Amino acid sequence: DAGITQSPRHKVTETGTPVTLRCHQTENHRYMYWYRQDPGHGLRLIHYSYGVKDTDKGEVSDGYSVSRSKTEDFLLTLESATSSQTSVYFCAISEPPGTAFANTGELFFGEGSRLTVL
Amino acid sequence: KQEVTQIPAALSVPEGENLVLNCSFTDSAIYNLQWFRQDPGKGLTSLLLIQSSQREQTSGRLNASLDKSSGRSTLYIAASQPGDSATYLCAVRSDNNAGNMLTFGGGTRLMVKP
């Protein structure tokens, strides 16, 4: 299994409070992603990173920010949590596809962080 | 915009059956397609990845095929077992840039009955 650790795994918080989710990888993969998974919506990309300090928005980025100061860590922050951000959040990693013979761009996921905003 | 559809949404079969899960996509200009398994309350586990230049990939009892021209991929599971019960998702990568958007299907929830 890919070495991806998400923390916390479960969190309950109140509307308006800041929340930070952490993704830590031991694979030295350059690309990292944050997804959310919701019933009826499937998996949707929030933000992604293509290198240290290089990040960009996904399709549902409003209300979220990210930071990547080291290759191994990718943080997702909800500045002021809302009930609509109650979800399961997944971190994923991959190598840039096609940059080397073995780099298929295969995506590996963490175990998820379940966030409930009351 | 790429759209990925998985039919059926749910499937129940008796143990031992061979079965096929379907994934269709609207834009055939893909870079690769990946099949995942997700157990309840867990993350996604990568099963097979097919590059756009490939026609199929095999791993144990699993075989995934890709027909880009028709916008379809199938995941074949031979001799199904109760332990295969899970949700299976396919995801299409449109190109080899980071934020290129893997587009996910909604998944097929598989139940294999003993």
Image (spheres, rainbow, N blue to C red):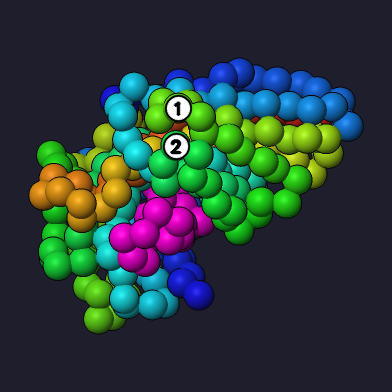
In the displayed structure image, the side of residue A75 where residue B108 appears, left or right: left
In the displayed structure image, the side of residue B67 where residue A60 appears, left or right: right
Residue B73 in percent (x, y) is at 28, 65
Magenta-drawn segment: B87-114
Residue A57 in percent (x, y) is at 59, 53
Residue B51 in percent (x, y) is at 20, 60
Which of the two discs, 1 and 2, labels the residue nearer the N terminus? 2
Query: Residue at horizontal 75%, vertical 40%?
Result: A85
Q: Which residue is mark 1?
A: A70
- Label 1 close to label 2 by CB (< 8 Å): yes
> Circle 1 sits in a helix, a strand or a loop, which is it?
strand
Q: Which residue is mark 2?
A: A52
Q: Quadrant of the N terminus of chain A?
A: top left
Q: Quadrant of the C terminus of chain A?
A: top right
> Circle 2 sits in a helix, a strand or a loop, which is it?
loop
Please give the chain letter of the residue carrying mark 2. A
Gap in angstroms between the C-alphas marked 1 and 2:
6 Å
Q: Is residue B66 visible?
A: yes
Query: Residue at horizontal 40%, vertical 54%?
Result: B98
Q: Can residue A93 be found in the magenta stretch?
A: no
Residue A62 in percent (x, y) is at 73, 51
Please give the chain letter of the residue carrying mark 1. A
In the displayed structure image, the side of residue B59 where residue A19 appears, left or right: right
In the image, residue A20 sits, relative to residue B26, either above or below, namely above
In the displayed structure image, the side of residue A79 where residue B91 appears, left or right: left
Query: Residue at horizontal 58%, vertical 35%?
Result: A67
Pick the residue in front: A21 or B90.
A21
Pick the residue in front: A4 or A97.
A97
